[in-house]
Image: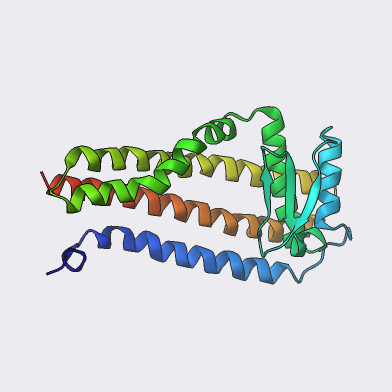
């Protein structure tokens, strides 16, 4: 029988994959719920990000609008915050939470936040690992059990796993900064803080799910290699 049909190691990653699907559904539903609830401050996501950056003295970091749904991110190389139209132009609680979260990343970068710096430094290796690990591993697996090649694939993939793990404190820290800034600067009223926190907590679940998938994949690769000894 063809190998994939009797590879029972797939069951190792199934729980993580189901968790990923649930997390993605959760972030979408939470975002859409609070994208229709507008902050009484009347400020847009772009205005909040700009104000927070200026208060931190980061006048040289622009806030740009980009295409896409939930495509919001801070680019540390270009030193720019990019917000999707639904966040940039909106005054919703979801928009303000996301805009403040991305500003939190800009503040991390400016302060030299160690987990962020470490993540940025290992990104090239993680990128190579995520692209090359599986081709190398399965070439080694299918062509006579070349353990050295399989081990190289596992080693490269370990950097992708490490990247996912380091991402967790980076994202949670940015979210906690966002909530503190929104509440402390009066951009959100006290009763608006919890909904914004729910949006960011839901988004954080997707990073947790990604880490779970990576870890279980790494375990699967180790098992497959050891079976061919």
Q: Nearer the viewer, residue 215 or 192?
A: 215
Name the residue at the right extreme: 42
The answer to whether 186 appears left or right of 149 in the picture is right
Q: Is residue 74 left or right of residue 2?
A: right
Asked if residue 179 can be seen in this view, the reply is no
The x and y percentages for residue 132 are 37, 46
Position in image of residue 64 (x %, y %): 79, 51
Tell which of 140 and 50 is nearer to you.
140
Which picture quadrant has residue 189? bottom right
Question: Which residue appears at 85% of the width and 49% of the height?
Answer: 186
**Observer able to see residue 104:** yes
Find residue 125 and report its horizontal and vertical position in percent.
45, 36
Q: Residue at x 27, y 58 (%)?
A: 12
- The quarter of the picture where the C terminus appears is top left
Quarter containing the N terminus:
bottom left
Instruction: Please name whichever residue, 204 or 217, is drawn nearer the observer in this view of the structure.
Output: 217
Residue at image point 47% right, 43% down: 127
Whether residue 205 sits left or right of residue 174 in the image: it is left
Q: Quadrant of residue 169?
A: top right
Q: Residue at x 53, y 65 (%)?
A: 24
Give x and y (percent) for residue 94. 72, 61
Judge left or right: residue 209 versus residue 6: right
């Amino acid at each position: 029988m063809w190998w994939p049909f009797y590879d029972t190691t797939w069951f190792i990653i199934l729980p993580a994959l189901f968790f990923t699907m649930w997390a993605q559904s959760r972030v979408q539903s939470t975002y859409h719920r609070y994208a229709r609830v507008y902050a009484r401050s009347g400020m847009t996501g772009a205005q909040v990000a700009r104000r927070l950056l200026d208060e931190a003295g980061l006048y040289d970091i622009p806030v740009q609008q980009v295409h896409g749904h939930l495509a919001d991110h801070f680019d540390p190389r270009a030193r720019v915050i990019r917000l999707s139209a639904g966040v940039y132009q909106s005054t919703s609680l979801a928009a303000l939470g996301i805009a403040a979260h991305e500003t939190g990343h800009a503040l991390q970068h400016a302060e030299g936040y160690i987990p962020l710096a470490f993540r940025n430094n290992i990104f090239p290796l993680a990128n190579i690992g995520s692209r090359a690990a599986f081709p190398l591993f399965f070439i080694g697996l299918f062509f006579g059990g070349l353990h050295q090649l399989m081990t190289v694939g596992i080693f490269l993939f370990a950097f992708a796993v490490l990247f996912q793990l380091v991402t967790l404190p980076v994202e949670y820290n940015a979210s906690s900064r966002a909530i503190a800034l929104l509440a402390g600067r009066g951009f959100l009223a006290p009763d608006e803080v919890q909904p914004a926190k729910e949006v960011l907590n839901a988004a954080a679940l997707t990073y947790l799910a990604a880490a779970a998938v990576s870890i279980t994949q790494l375990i699967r690769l180790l098992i497959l290699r050891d079976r061919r000894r």
